[in-house]
Amino acid sequence: VPVSLPMLAIGGLAVGLGVSYSSGCTSGHGVCGMARFSKRSITATLVFMATTAATVFLLRHVTGA
């Protein structure tokens, strides 16, 4: 999917903010944190998944993208 340079930069900033706010990356929480039954990592992973589902729903069904 072709993406413009400004959108790529915005996406990179969004990922960076998410990593800093959640104290780790999605795969770190999802794989390592959940494997050790960390409540914080389980919560973070659930939030990541819910946000992803909401984003896909909005983009596909609301905006028609």
Image (cartoon, rainbow, N blue to C red):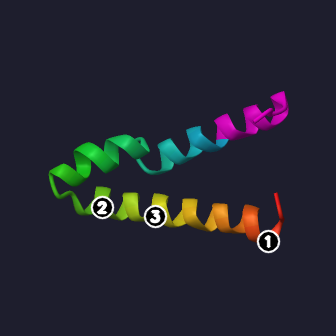
Estimate the spatial distance between the alpha carbons at disc 3 and disc 1, rounded to whole Å.
21 Å
Q: Residues within 10 Å of mark 2 (few under 14, many from 20)?
A: some
Q: CA distance from mark 1 to mark 2?
A: 29 Å
The picture places residue 34, in percent across and down from the top left corner, at 23, 54
Q: Residues within 10 Å of mark 1 (few under 14, many from 20)?
A: few
Q: Position of residue 4 (x, y in %)?
A: 84, 32
Which residue is disc 2 drawn over? 42
In this view, 19 is above or below 43: above
Residue type at mark 3 is: Val
Q: Is residue 34 above or below residue 19?
A: below
Give above or below for 54 relative to 36.
Answer: below
Q: Secondary structure at mark 2?
A: helix
Q: Residue furthest bottom?
A: 62
Q: Is residue 15 above or below residue 43?
A: above
- Give the CA separation, mark 3 to mark 2: 9 Å
| Residue 9 counted in the magenta span | yes
Amino acid on which the number 2 mark rests in the picture:
Ile
